[in-house]
Structures are given as structure tokens and as C-alpha cells.
Image: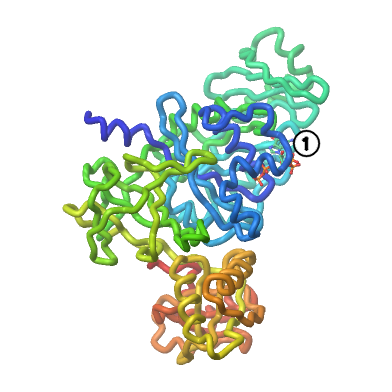
């Protein structure tokens, strides 16, 4: 096996998805600690500011209040080269969060044990399902009061439509949390809390050890025996193919904050998660092990350094090896070029990369050549990857320029910001660019947009919020999209590829339109 192939085989590229506050940042940091990528042991459960300093790296963007970043952190662990893609949540939630999942080969879903499946997780989960990538579940915060573990699994299966395979099982929760029973090795990993401090004891005991009742308490002991019996009889069997096809989710219980169950999780995850996956280009699969370099653009971060008015384009390498200064071909621009200052993010640092492999993410400086979904490949081996879908925004505003003299800058700004994928723009059929409808996935994007129009394009805009909540691309057999039977508060618009869409104020109106228009299909993403 060549070293290129070895390098690719040891790569794992995944994203962590969760609803805000479930513990994504805490888990990410614990993983980074194992990999030695950060050295903040003990300080992880620190002030919010300290935590953010580690995983929200675009601190300057943050101060400007417009952090929309999602990047990658790379670290090594036991021979594996791990790329964790950050999926912005909280107020940073944006279309980037969805797009990041297009660059991942697996996802870890963090669930708060007291809350179960929450809204944002549901949305992100849908994108993972669309791609059939493996999804691992980490049920977090077992050191707090938690819901019944059987109920949690049942909810995941019912609401998300994925089967579950428990790798370990919790013994108690909250103050009574005593550890987990590993259903594969049939050992108990015990957890001890002393006063305010938590210590993780690595004692591995077998469930029939006579000292077990003393260790975990009589009641927990009895409960565990009952649970194991139930699980042995009723749970799904291990099936690696189903896991890797995203049909069966391995479930782990633990507590990221107290570092309980994180390392066993990481180890098992690395065994079960696949190396870089093949991607479709021109209808055929490109193997990551193909020697020729290829990559696609999944994210564009504008004006990282205001002084230079530059932007950084993030590429997911799909095959082969990238070498600094190599000549590449930009398919959509039909141009040969060298990528400028290729860099990689290593926790909080950015470093120029000399080489990178399939599975890795690199950022390159970009004067405005690239768009989301573009392919960049070796000059001698031309491929074109299928584009990245456009995901339905959820917030809409009508936008126009305040000063008619600024029309040109307005059009330029709106078009460029939309091309980067920070906003989506629509217009009413047969309307020009005097007024556009801007759609965003997270409301913060409106402020980012307004701020950028003012500071980068010198245009003040008038933004009028619209009450639409849903947008759907029109699919199916529809001859005249403007002649559909729709309710009075539903609007027909077009995107700038002239595709027709419908804007709805409620789900009820979506159903209404579907019922009254035979053959109509409504899609919440558009395949580009
Ligand atoms: P997020 O990135 O998914 O939004 O979640 P984050 O890791 O920021 O965690 C949200 C809150 O939950 C944090 O508390 C964090 O300390 C806490 N947390 C994470 N994992 C666990 C766990 O396993 N057990 C317990 N008990 N708490 C956990 P916070 O009060 O919001 O922040 P801080 O003031 O503690 O920094």
C-alpha cells in the first residue's frame, strides 16, 4: 500500500450535531484534549469566554457580532488523523451549518439526557439522513437527572426514524449515577462523585462480581440486571453495514463535562466510523483512494481580514493528495491555477499546509472566483462533483436600497453575498433587482448582511420583515407555476436561477396547496 493510501485510510472526518446546550462544545473539547490538540485540562469546565476561546476561533468576527464561522479542527489519536467539523449553533445557526454536513463522512449526535431529541438536532439529522452517513449518538449529562434510557432510545427511533444499538447502558443518573455497563465487553465502568468533584474510576467489573452491589448500590444492581435482560432480549443486533449506511445508530451514554465515557466512546467510534467516503461526480463515484487530487467548495468565509478584503474558501478534499503549489483546475471557472496560501486550522491556529489528503479540509485565499459547490481537481484528471443542495431558509425580509443612486453597489453586494451562500435571494416573477426577498436560515444572517452591505459596499438598506416561514421549491409535473391554486397569503417567487418557489406562512398552507394541485411536489431543498 502506498503512503498516500495509508494516509487516506487513517482519516476520519465528522461533524458533531446537537441542539444548543446539549454539550457539543464540551464534548469537542474533551476529544481535542485526548488528541493533545489543546492543553486546557481542568479548565474546560470554565467560563463561557474561556471555552469559546478554544472552539470559536474567529474571535474577531465574534466581537463584530457576526460570527458565522464553521471550520475544522484536526488532531491525531492512536494513529488516526481526525478532522472535526464545527457546526455553528446558537445564534450562529445558518445554512453553513447544513453545508458542513455535506463535507462530513459521519456525524455524532449529542443529546441532553434530560431533554431528549430537540428541534435543531431534528433539522440537522434530516441532512445526515439525506446523505446516508453513519450517525453516532452520545447521550450526555448522565451526571444530571435524566430521562429513562429506554424512553430516550424509543424517542430517537420514533422521531428520527433510525434504529438504535446501545453500546453501553447507564447505571442510575444524577446524584445516583454510578457508571455504565458496556454491553459489548460485558464490563462495568464505574463513576464516582465525591463532593463537588467528580472522579472517573476506571474500575472494570463484571456484572456477576460479588462486590458489584456494594459498588453501585443494591437498587441500581437490581435495576441493571433487569435492564440487561430486557436489552439482551429486545435490542437490535450489531450490524456494521447498517451502521455505516446510517440506518442503525450506535448509542453511548456518558457525561462530557466530567469526562465520563468519552474516551471509550472515541475508541469505539474510530473503529466503527468509515475512512473518507466516495463522492459522486458526473454520475459516477470518485474513490477517495484515487491518486488524482479532487475537492469541492462547501463554505466561503468572507472578509476574514478586513484590511485585505479577502475571503477564505473551504475545500473538502475528496480524493488523492494535495500539494502546495500544485497546479489545479477550477472546473466552473474553466481555469488552471495555483491555490493561494492553502491553510489548515489546528484548534485555534491556522497553518499553511504543504500537503493534505482526501478527508482533509483546507482553506484557500480567494479573490472571489469560487462559489459553493464548485469542483477543484488535478489539471490532468477532470471531474465535476454534484453540487451542494440549497437548503430552505426560514426567515424572510423584503430588502431595497435607501438611496437610488446606489443601485449598482446594491446589486453587486446582494449578488456577491448570495454567491458566497450567506443569504439566499428571491424575486417576484418579472421583477428586477430594485427590490429582493432575502431568505436566511438563522436570523443573525440578516444583521451580518446589513452590516456587510454598509461596511463593504457602502449601501444602506431598508429591510422589512416578512411573515413567511416556509419556502418550497416547486417540483413534479407543474406547467405554469404562476397559475397554481394557492391560498391568498402564499406567494410565488423565483430564485436567481429562475426556479419557481412558493412562500408559505404556515404548514397548513403547504398542505392546502398540495391537496389542491395535482402532481405538485414541494421540496425543502434544491439540488444544484
Ligand atoms: P453546546 O456546545 O451544545 O451549546 O453545549 P456546551 O458544551 O456549551 O454545554 C452547555 C452547558 O452544559 C454548559 O454549561 C456545560 O458546562 C454543560 N454541560 C456539558 N456537558 C455536561 C455534562 O456532561 N454534565 C453536566 N452536568 N453539564 C454539562 P453552562 O452552565 O451553560 O456553561 P458554563 O458556565 O458551565 O461554562
Q: Residue furthest top?
A: 210
Q: Nearer the viewer, residue 491 or 417?
A: 417
Residue name at image x 63 percent, y 82 percent: 462
Question: The N terminus is located in which quarter?
Answer: top left
Label 1: which secondary element: loop
Percent position of residue 11, x then y:
38, 36
355 horizontally vs 39: left or right:
left
Q: How is the image coloured?
A: rainbow
Residue name at image x 54 percent, y 52 percent: 125
Percent position of residue 477, x then y:
39, 80
Q: Residue furthest left?
A: 380
Q: Residues within 10 Å of mark 1 (few under 14, many from 20)?
A: some
Q: Residue furthest front?
A: 307
Please determine whether, in this image, residue 290 is positioned above or below residue 385: above
Q: Nearer the viewer, residue 13 or 415?
A: 415
Residue name at image x 57 percent, y 70 percent: 455
Percent position of residue 186, x then y:
57, 19
350 horizontally vs 280: left or right:
right
Residue 222 showing in the rendered view: no
Residue 258 falls in image quadrant = top right
Q: Which residue is mark 1?
A: 145
Residue 308 showing in the rendered view: yes
Residue name at image x 72 percent, y 46 percent: 115
Residue 25 falls in image quadrant = top right
Question: The C terminus is located in which quarter?
Answer: bottom left
Amino acid at each position: 500500500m502506498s503512503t498516500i493510501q495509508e494516509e487516506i485510510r487513517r482519516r476520519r472526518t465528522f461533524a458533531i450535531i446537537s441542539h444548543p446546550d446539549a454539550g457539543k462544545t464540551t464534548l469537542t473539547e474533551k476529544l481535542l484534549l485526548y488528541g493533545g490538540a489543546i492543553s486546557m485540562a481542568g479548565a474546560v469546565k470554565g467560563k463561557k469566554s474561556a471555552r469559546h476561546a478554544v472552539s470559536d476561533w474567529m474571535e474577531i468576527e465574534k466581537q463584530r457580532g457576526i460570527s458565522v464561522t464553521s471550520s475544522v479542527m484536526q488532531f491525531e489519536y492512536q494513529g488516526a488523523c481526525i478532522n472535526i467539523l464545527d457546526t455553528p449553533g446558537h445564534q450562529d445557526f445558518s445554512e453553513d451549518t447544513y453545508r458542513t454536513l455535506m463535507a462530513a463522512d459521519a456525524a455524532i449526535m449529542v443529546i441532553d439526557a434530560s431533554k431528549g431529541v430537540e428541534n435543531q438536532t431534528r433539522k440537522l439529522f434530516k441532512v445526515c439522513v439525506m446523505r446516508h452517513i453513519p450517525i453516532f449518538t452520545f447521550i450526555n449529562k448522565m451526571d444530571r437527572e435524566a430521562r429513562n434510557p429506554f424512553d430516550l432510545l424509543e424517542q430517537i427511533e420514533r422521531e428520527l426514524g433510525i434504529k438504535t444499538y446501545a453500546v453501553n447502558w447507564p447505571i442510575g443518573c444524577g446524584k445516583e449515577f454510578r457508571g455504565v455497563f458496556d454491553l459489548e465487553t460485558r464490563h462495568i465502568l464505574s463513576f464516582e462523585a465525591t463532593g463537588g468533584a467528580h472522579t472517573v474510576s476506571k474500575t472494570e467489573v463484571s456484572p456477576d462480581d460479588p462486590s458489584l452491589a456494594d459498588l453501585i448500590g443494591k437498587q441500581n444492581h437490581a435495576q441493571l440486571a433487569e435492564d440487561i435482560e430486557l436489552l439482551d432480549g429486545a435490542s437490535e443486533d450489531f450490524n456494521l453495514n447498517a451502521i455505516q449506511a446510517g440506518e442503525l445508530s450506535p448509542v453511548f451514554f456518558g457525561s462530557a463535562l466530567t469526562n465520563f465515557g468519552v474516551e471509550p466512546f472515541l475508541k469505539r467510534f474510530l473503529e466503527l466510523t468509515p475512512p473518507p467516503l466516495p463522492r459522486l461526480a458526473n454520475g459516477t463515484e470518485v474513490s477517495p483512494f484515487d491518486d488524482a487530487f479532487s475537492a469541492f467548495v462547501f463554505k466561503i468565509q468572507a472578509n476574514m481580514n478586513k484590511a485585505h478584503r479577502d475571503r477564505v474558501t473551504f475545500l473538502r478534499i475528496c480524493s488523492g493528495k494535495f500539494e502546495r503549489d500544485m497546479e489545479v483546475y477550477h472546473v466552473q471557472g474553466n481555469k488552471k491555477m495555483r491555490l493561494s496560501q492553502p491553510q489548515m486550522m489546528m484548534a485555534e491556529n491556522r497553518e499553511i499546509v504543504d500537503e493534505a489528503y482526501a478527508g482533509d479540509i483546507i482553506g484557500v485565499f480567494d479573490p472571489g472566483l469560487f462559489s459553493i459547490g464548485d469542483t477543484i481537481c488535478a489539471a490532468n484528471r477532470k471531474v465535476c462533483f454534484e453540487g451542494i443542495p440549497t437548503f430552505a431558509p426560514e426567515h424572510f425580509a423584503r430588502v431595497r436600497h435607501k438611496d437610488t443612486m446606489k443601485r449598482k453597489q446594491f446589486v453587486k453586494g446582494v449578488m456577491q453575498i448570495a454567491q458566497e451562500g450567506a443569504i439566499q435571494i428571491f424575486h417576484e416573477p418579472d421583477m428586477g433587482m430594485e427590490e429582493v426577498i432575502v431568505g436566511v436560515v438563522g436570523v443573525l444572517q440578516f444583521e451580518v448582511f446589513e452590516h456587510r452591505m454598509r461596511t463593504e459596499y457602502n449601501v444602506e438598506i431598508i429591510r422589512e420583515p416578512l411573515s413567511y416561514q416556509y419556502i418550497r421549491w416547486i417540483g413534479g409535473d407543474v406547467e405554469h407555476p404562476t397559475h397554481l391554486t394557492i391560498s391568498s397569503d402564499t406567494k410565488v417567487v423565483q430564485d436567481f436561477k429562475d426556479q419557481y418557489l412558493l412562500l408559505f406562512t404556515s404548514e397548513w398552507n403547504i398542505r392546502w396547496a398540495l391537496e389542491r394541485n395535482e402532481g405538485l411536489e414541494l421540496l425543502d431543498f434544491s439540488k444544484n
